Amino acid sequence: MAEIPSLLEPITEFRPGRPLVLFLPGMSGNKRQWDFVIRRLDGVDADLAYGAPVLAHAAFGNARPTVSQLGAAIAAELTAAGRDRVTVVSHSVGAFVALVIAHELPSVVRSAVLANGGLSSVARFIDRPLRRVPGATTSRLSYLRLFALVGTPVPPVVKRAIAGREWSSRLLVGRRLVSRPALASREARDSLMEEAGNARTIAGLWKNRHYWREFERTAAGIPAKVIFLVGGQDPMTSVADTGVMAELLPNAEIRVLPGVGHAAPLEAPDAVAAAVKDALAAT
């Protein structure tokens, strides 16, 4: 029987008995953003790994899994690997995958850090968009703008050209989606451009458009310590939206990052790293 491809990509050498910090990307699959946080985890006594995104993967016969399928498959792999102390760190839509894993492994996933993960309004919007579009608020228009940004195909050469200048990157992403620190360096802009211009992202959102209903049913069964990191100027995941999700979970707290948009790992890596260390201390 052929071996099932792994959904985990080690960052450090795995050693028995150590806790694991698992970094999950958002819907576009960009894992490079976590490098800004990982650099600030020097001295942390834990194994580190990237988790697969909600994109087509060989573990699913090169098909795209749903959030629930991916979370359950990662949980099964963690169990097979004998991991017993896991902290899951996620960005944006990856929060839902993180929470699936925490629900599947309530005694293993001790904590989670969800950066820009308070997606209650976005999730309810894509669950019933036709009912919500006619009365679109500014925030709902922001959702549509972001979907267009990440879903409109952009050739790699164009992405590189845009990332070459801060002004052109700012023109593409707008003034509210991310703050200036996320555009300050070429490395950060390159990472940000990985989130943009890929039609497969919209396909992933569509496939998971009704996931919010499942989350509402399962949230109470997630005992892990959950730290939500909310960008103070994030148009996608406001403090109020995050509060809706936090109230459904038994053990959640909200930390607001002033001046930060929807790219917390790039905009405030020190704050994200601090939250990861706090989460590890709870394991």
Image (cartoon, rainbow, N blue to C red):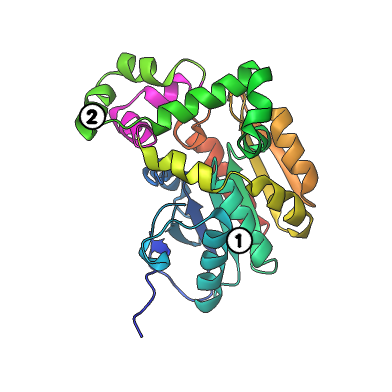
Neighbourhood count class around disc 2 (C-alpha, 10 Å): few under 14, some 14–19, many 20 upward: some
Quadrant location, the N terminus: bottom left
Could you tell me residue 220's position as x and y percent? Answer: 79, 55
Amino acid type, callout 1 = Ile
The number of callouts visible is 2
Instruction: Determine which quarter of the picture holds residue 169.
Output: top left
Boundaries of the magenta span? 177-197
What residue sits 62% from the left and 21% below the top?
Answer: 139
Instruction: Determine which quarter of the picture holds residue 189.
Output: top left
What residue sits 43% from the left and 45% below the top?
Answer: 34
Amino acid type, callout 2 = Arg
Quickly name the residue at label 1: 101
- Is residue 135 placed above or below 115 in the rendered structure? above
Query: Which residue is at the front of the view, 166 or 125?
Result: 125
Would you say residue 185 sits in the magenta stretch?
A: yes
Neighbourhood count class around disc 1 (C-alpha, 10 Å): few under 14, some 14–19, many 20 upward: many
Query: Which residue is at the front of the view, 216 or 176?
Result: 216
